Image (cartoon, grey):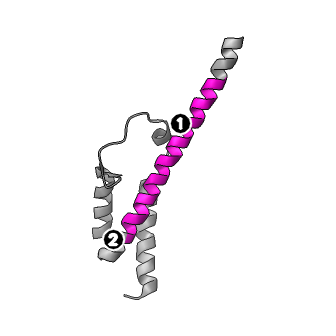
């Protein structure tokens, strides 16, 4: 398999993963703790990766690239969620201080 074909397959797999794992408001506003993880990913996400490996017939090297990209993507989503929570907490504190002064 040539490099361009391999690159295209990996990008297709990653784009499908991004679409499936996209951040939405429910994710950002949920207060429940993260589920048990396997090397930084929830078990359901690991299952998604294994399904993509089979669907795109990825070899071990391709799968490692996909897993690395997936972990980075997932951790980025968690960081966004953390930042949003901190910002909301700060806004709530400011609003509460204004309400106390009134």
Q: Residue at x 35, y 70 (%)?
A: 64
State the SS at label 2: helix
Q: Is residue 62 magenta?
A: no
In the picture, measured across the screen, residue 88 lies left or right of residue 101, that is: left
Magenta span: chief secondary structure: helix
Label 2 Cα neighbours within 10 Å, binned few <14 / some 14-19 / many ≥20 = many
| Image marks 1 and 2: residues in contact by CB distance under 8 Å | no
- Res 84 quadrant in image: top right
Instruction: Compare residues 44 and 60 and report the one nearer the observer.
Output: 60
Residue 73 location (% of width, % of height):
46, 57
- The image's mark for residue 50 is none
Location of mark 1 (residue): 85
Q: Which residues are magenta?
A: 65-94
Direction bottom: furthest residue: 2
Q: Is residue 96 visible?
A: yes
> Between disc 1 and disc 2, whose residue precedes?
2
Which residue is denoted by mark 2 in the rendering?
A: 63
Q: Where is 96 relative to 48, above or below? A: above
Asked whether the viewer can see residue 22, the reply is: no
Residue 42, percent from left and from top: 32, 50
User: Residue at coordinates 45% horizontally, 59% vertically from top-left?
Assistant: 72
Image location (x, y in percent) of residue 61: 33, 76
């Amino acid at each position: 398999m040539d490099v361009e074909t391999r690159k295209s397959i990996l990008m297709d797999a990653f784009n499908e993963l991004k679409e499936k794992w996209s951040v939405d408001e429910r994710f950002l506003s949920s207060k429940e703790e993260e589920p048990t993880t396997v090397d930084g990913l929830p078990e359901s996400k690991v299952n998604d990766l294994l399904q993509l490996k089979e669907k795109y017939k990825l070899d071990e090297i391709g799968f490692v690239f996909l897993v690395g990209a997936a972990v980075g993507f997932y951790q980025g989503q968690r960081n966004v969620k953390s930042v949003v929570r901190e910002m909301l907490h700060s806004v709530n504190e400011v609003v509460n201080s204004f309400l106390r002064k009134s």
